[in-house]
Image (cartoon, helix red, strand yellow):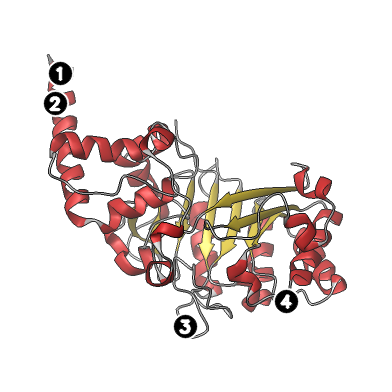
Amino acid sequence: MIKLDTFTIFLSWKCNFTCLHCGFSCGPCRNEKMSPEKAMEYITEASRDQNLKMVAYSGGEPFLFYDEVVELMSYSFRKKLKAGIVTNCFWADSYDTAYHRLYKLKKLGLEEIITSVDEYHLHYVRAENIRNVINAAIKLQIRAGVNLLMTRKSRITKENVHEILGIPKDDLEDGNKAWLRESSPVLSGRAKQHLPPEDLISYSEAELLNNPCYFAVRNAVVTPDGSMYACCGFGGATENGPSSITYGGNLNEMSFDEIYQKLKNNLLLNMIVYHGPYVLLKIAEQYDSSIKFRKKYVSNCDVCEEISSNIPLRDTLINALRELAIKAQNNART
């Protein structure tokens, strides 16, 4: 059975960076933002699910609103919920600054902090800032996650990132202290405009088929306007909105429980959770052999983006699953 684990709040689409890879097209000119009052309202609703363990904060850059993050973590901590946060580390210009800010959040339940090390982010932030955050997190026993967004031309990899950051390799490879994850950007948002598809590191059907997704539905997400999705990799949602296959509804119009039950009972999302999204491409192809889609993808998230943005493919898939559901119901009756 699928159970809620994490509720991620995208506080804002505002970011002080304008990275070319950004799938959400975040930047300094984006002004969409969730109020602390709304965020607390959403946390209150989500916390009624007894399975919820963590409230995470993402965006945009959450540390642009540090005081509000403190307020929200304090609120969720009183509800006995752990916390996580994603940051570009712009604010950590010294180790002391990183330590004191993270120390305050640690006291409010912060268990994991995630950042990125790649050519896109290092165009805007010093490696020293990222080192300050990771070292402070390790000292405070906050797990540090490091995403390495790569193309075929990338110079930064798992093998040399410790040299670039000036952090002992053993610290970055100790799963209790930190984790490293390599992946190519998904072609949505700004990445779709600026990154050549042939530069991405992609995988074939054999590598993606039957590759279950742990995050869908278990990591529910709310965006600044109250839209709720089944995961934090909701493929082009800032462009396609409710057309995303992971969209559940708006928390300003429906309750958290109503939307979550809808996501939890969605056949398409269940297939993504247990079998991975690539199997959906195969179902659509069997239903209509004329349907067109790419044969290689950088990740499960990329497959979901294809289904969300490729309207004929998505509609074909919905019709195919509807027919399968009807057949299953008829078979159950006989």
Q: Quadrant of the C terminus?
A: top left
Work out how far the residue at label 1 is from the one at label 2, CA to CA, in angstroms: 6 Å
> Looking at the rendered structure, which numbered label has been put on residue 91?
4
**Above/below status of 210 relative to 153:** above
**Above/below status of 122 relative to 77:** below
Question: Looking at this view, is 255 or 198 the one in front?
Answer: 198
Eye-nearest disc, 1 or 4: 4
Q: Residues within 10 Å of mark 1 (few under 14, many from 20)?
A: few
Q: Is residue 66 visible?
A: yes
- In the rendering, at what x and y percent does residue 83 appear? 66, 55
Eye-nearest disc, 2 or 4: 4
Mark 2 is on which residue type?
Lys
- Where residue 253 sits, quadrant-wise, is bottom left
Task: Indicate the secondary structure of the residue bearing disc 1.
Answer: helix
First-in-chain label (2 vs 4): 4
- In the rendering, at what x and y percent does residue 176 appear? 77, 42
* Residue to which mark 3 is pinned: 31
> Looking at the rendered structure, which numbered label has been put on residue 331?
1
**Above/below status of 86 relative to 158:** below
Mark 3 is on which residue type?
Asn
First-in-chain label (1 vs 3): 3
Extreme-bottom residue of the structure: 29
From the viewer's perspective, is 267 left or right of 221? left
* Identity of the residue drawn at 44% across and 49% down: 298
Task: Indicate the secondary structure of the residue bearing disc 3.
Answer: loop
Q: Residues within 10 Å of mark 4 (few under 14, many from 20)?
A: some
Q: Is residue 107 visible?
A: no
First-in-chain label (3 vs 4): 3
Q: Quadrant of the N terminus?
A: top left
* Residue to which mark 2 is pinned: 327
